[in-house]
Amino acid sequence: MERIKKQHLNIYKVKDSSIEFDDLCPNSAIPSFEIENEGNISPSCKYRLYIQRDREKNPGWYEFLKPVINRDNPILNRVSSFILFITQGDKKFILTGGFGHTKIKHLIDDEFGLSVALRVMEKTKIQAILQKPMKGQTRQIFRLVAGYDPSLDMDNYNRILKSIDGTSVDENLPNVKVSGKASLSLNVAITFEDLSSLLEKISLILLKDPKINFPKTYELVTSEDLKENLNDTIVKELNDFLNNRSDRDRLYIEFKDPLIQFQCSSFTIRIDGDAPIEFNDFSLEEVKNILIKNGTSEFDEINDLRGIKFSGEDDNGHSLFEDQSLKELLICEADLNFCSYIYIEKKWMKILDDLSSYVDEQLGKIDIIRDVFPDWNLSIHNRELQYNKAVANSKGFICLDQDLIRTPATTSIEVCDLYDKNENNFIHVKRTWGSKASYLFSQGLISASNIHQYQEFRRECISKWPDLFEEGFDKNLKVTYAIADRKASSSDFPFNLSFFAKLNLISNVSTINSFGYKVLLAPINIIPSKSKNSPKKTKQKNTKTGGGQKPIKATQKIKTDSVKSAEILLAEILNK
């Protein structure tokens, strides 16, 4: 008997099971695809197959070599793709190959593959996981694991599981390699006639309880009134950003699949059906520039974001994603009525009390040093450097603010703002609060990481400041975050930080602690400067960072995106 060849199947589940089959896959061809065949696999299983044949594109290197290529013998890459629609009982599935997946994103259940994978694997069979941190500068984390128990990994409280890879132990899919995300990817020996049976088994698997449980730290917002209020927040934040009324504190954009962005060599944006505009830097700042240049500076409601469509191609001109809207790719963070929310992939999620309690518990483990730093009077020291020099003189610290270290392996790094040699304490000072605090936390993490990991960096510090540092200064090291704001002087500091600021802080502290370093927090009270022209009026609070601040410079070893996400309490915004 001939051995059945293994196939790599990508299976999606249609999110709306009530949709009629003919409405799901109409007889009219999907753009650039044609109906190849339709019929029944079994009495309860109907299919319709679309094919795109031999799509031709010049390879990405063609333009470079075009002057020396024989034009009588053209060079073309050819790719064929398929989309297979299947109705199985009351459920509907889609299988794709090639670039067929780019045509069906709007139809699919985004958690189908993940739901199946968690029900067929045991924790000892997990091989890789992809997660999205709910806060921080690292936007995607991919890990290869062995003997991994997710319930013992505290970092999972700060991460949303996006995909999982491993081997099935379920009797319906024994020893099958499984990858679960939006799609269920299976490496299985199968014929076309076996599809009906396979889909029946998958439906049975979905009725079971998960074998693997990651910490559930969020829940989907279902209240229409609450979603409407939160959606208004997105529109306001985006409009303010487009019109330079505020920074993009709580907004950023990113791909569902982080690898696609790096595979794309070019992108296009279409605004309300107009001709596509090509660009190369996929960032919110670049999108803003394009929108403003083309006359779009305000949105009335969140659904208006559906008119902004993005597509991307690789070096060979092959489409990697098509017509994904700004509404799909935008991420927003919000606090409302003492609860924290995050908008990801068109869904609002509420951060659960378990996560909030965990964050506060971890925050309570950080030592707070009060009354160490004098008040920061902005009438006397209106710049950070001025304040740091004054503190250095009064406390016997060394001011290293804006004094950078450069090595061949890194960009310019600020070791710290103030250094206390007696305590080997690297102090990072910023006039900041809430969202902007992420810059401060990153500065401390980047400095500590370079000191811990790179001998060349330590040698450069010793060479530049021989009176301060000597061999072994990376031992028994302390890192202090000195946060300057009127709220920092409150007795409930740091618990009065916004949720996402606290989440970002404990994530950074956990990493620095893993180096063997101790982290301290120090509040600094701000005394505002008084306006000479209108002394009786209260000066509007400046939500931007104080003077003299410098952008945190990331190294090649610490992966961050070009977007620094942050948040401001929604109540504060509405009260302005």
Image (cartoon, rainbow, N blue to C red):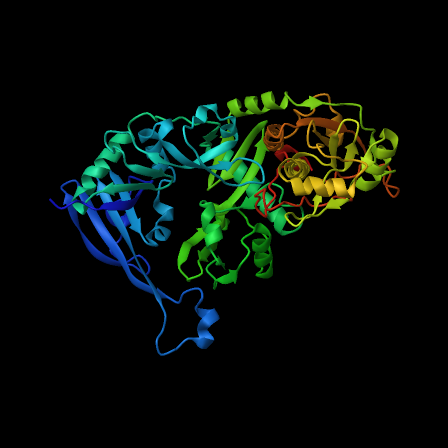
**Residue 89 visible in image:** no
Instruction: Count all numbered tags in the image, as a single digit.
Output: 0
Based on the displayed image, in which of its 4 quarters is residue 249 positioned? top right
Q: Quadrant of the C terminus?
A: top right
Quarter residue 447 falls in: top right
Residue 141 position within the rendered picture, expressed as x and y whole percent measured from the top left: 49, 39
Displayed quadrant of residue 295: bottom right
Q: Is residue 61 above or below residue 474?
A: below
User: Relative to residue 264, is residue 75 depicted above or below?
Assistant: below
The residue lying furthest to the front in this view is 471
* Horizontal side, residue 218 vs residue 369: left or right: left
Q: Position of residue 191 (x, y in %)?
A: 18, 45
Residue extending farthest to the bottom is 72
Residue at screen point 41% across, 54% down: 320
User: Which one is nearer the viewer's eye here, 472 or 512?
Assistant: 472
Evaluate whether residue 501 shows in this view. yes
Q: Choose between 534 and 396: the one closer to the eye.
A: 396
Residue 130, given in percent of the width and then of the height, sits at 45, 38
Q: Is residue 426 left or right of residue 141?
A: right
Tell me which residue sits at (65%, 24%) in the image. Answer: 495
Q: Position of residue 432 (x, y in %)?
A: 72, 36
Instruction: Tell me which residue sits at (53%, 25%) in the image.
Output: 355
Location of the N terminus (image quadrant): top left
Nearest the viewer among 322 and 210 is 210
